[in-house]
Image (spheres, rainbow, N blue to C red):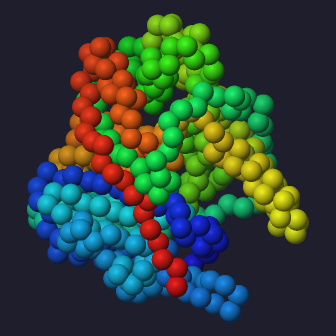
Amino acid sequence: MNKADLSGIISSPKKPNIMQFLFTLTEEIDCGLMNDAMQKTIRRYPYFAFRIIRAENGFDKIENGLPIVVKDSFSEELILGSETVNYHWIAAACEGRRLKLVIHHLIADGRSAMRFYKTLLYCYFSEKYNVQLDTEGITLPDSPISPDEDVKVFGLLDGEDGTNRTIVKDPFMIPETVDDDMKGYLYQVTIPEKEFLSLSKGSDNSPLTLLTVYMAKMFQNLYPENEKDIYAGIAIDARNALNCPESRFTNSYVIFVRHSPAKLGMDMERLGTMTRGQIILQSEEEILRYVHNSVMRISAQIRSTSDQTEKQRLMHEIYQLVASNPTYTVSYVGNPEWGSLEPYIEEEYTLIMNNKLFLEVNAAGGKFCVAWVQGFENDAYVKTLQSLLREDGIHCEVSGPFLHKWPKCCLP
């Protein structure tokens, strides 16, 4: 069992980095069958079945043979690592047609979590509907585990080049005051997939670049006197660059796309070309390896010094490399390719806590499902985006706000 995630999990128990996946299925969920599917699925992913214990020199990870908990209601909070979830760091709950899956982000990212929950849903739908589903694009519960699934890359890699990487400099920052760093506000935004894809193809935009263009226009619409660049932090999967295509660990880095207010009056095709160019350049494997190697070098410096002030300075350097301070952040893992699962899934949202503004984009049920999480109550931002999309013939719906509290974990 790889323990590379242990130090990260125990370092911030009061503000854990936890992902929540919210699914709405087409029919009411049989919680008993979902529990059976979960226990069948976890056997395929043994690296997710662990507990943390106190050891002589701090904490350790050991195998956990207890069942993964699947609650039959959303009323009870899922606290990872606690006795109520059998000390696991993954848990679930069902209520009506909704399924909630909670996973600590340090043991998986959106890509590897997707692999897990597609297996889970495959097992559930197969049993519930007594059908033989097409298995294309789905990891089966009895399929072999790839050699690099439980591998976290730490060493330096050849072939790095950071010359085309954008650095965040004096960005436009949302002026709202965060209400409470332990809670946020969730809006569920849905955009018809065909309408959005039609517009994106007609303007040299991908769905991701089109969304970033509209977000930049939204900010400038709200703050027309602003002259500072608007930066989007975009999560990019670095697995191929790190030579670990199947790794279950968080293997994404944030790149930064800059929108100048002076250029936002250009037509959508021109803005799309400019935005796609920035993303393509910064997604080159050489740049992703440059970020990885930089983090490895700085981490080595942190381990070699006992000066706490110097440690803090170096940690800030890492923060600037992997997160920095963009105007907002957006993550889209790409088309989930639901295949035979698609007829049974109506919506999916991914929630990650963020103090300012974080958008997680999924595709399900013929629409893009955007989980818009912000640390302040003002709905002017999401409503302005909705208006801009509707002006261009895109039928955008917004639900919320729903109070979103920072998920909790429990160390022994």
- x and y percentages locating residue 213 in the rendered image: 47, 22
Residue that appears at 56% across and 42% down: 236
Tell how many labels. 0
Residue 203 appears left or right of 305: left
The answer to whether residue 217 of the structure is visible from this angle is no
* Rendered position, 138 above or below 333: below
**Nearer-the-camera pick, 67 or 189:** 189
Tell me where residue 408 sits by quadrant: bottom left
Residue ranking furthest to the bottom = 56
Image quadrant in which the N terminus is located: bottom right
Q: Which of the pair 187/33 is nearer the observer? A: 187
Q: Residue at x 59, y 67 (%)?
A: 12
Q: Nearer the viewer, residue 340 or 264?
A: 264
Q: Give above or below for 407 relative to 165.
A: below
**Nearer to us in this view, 253 or 184:** 184
Image position of 124 (left or right of 233): left
Q: Quadrant of residue 370?
A: top left
- Residue 155 left/right relative to 281: right
Location of residue 71 in the rendering, given as x and y in whole percent from the top left corner = 25, 73
Query: Can the viewer see residue 264?
Result: yes
Most extreme residue toward the top, as rendered?
266
Query: Residue 171, percent across and down?
Result: 64, 28
What residue is at 60 percent from the left and 73 percent from the top? 10
Task: Give the residue drawn at x 54%, y 32%.
Answer: 175
Q: Is residue 143 above or below residue 291?
A: below
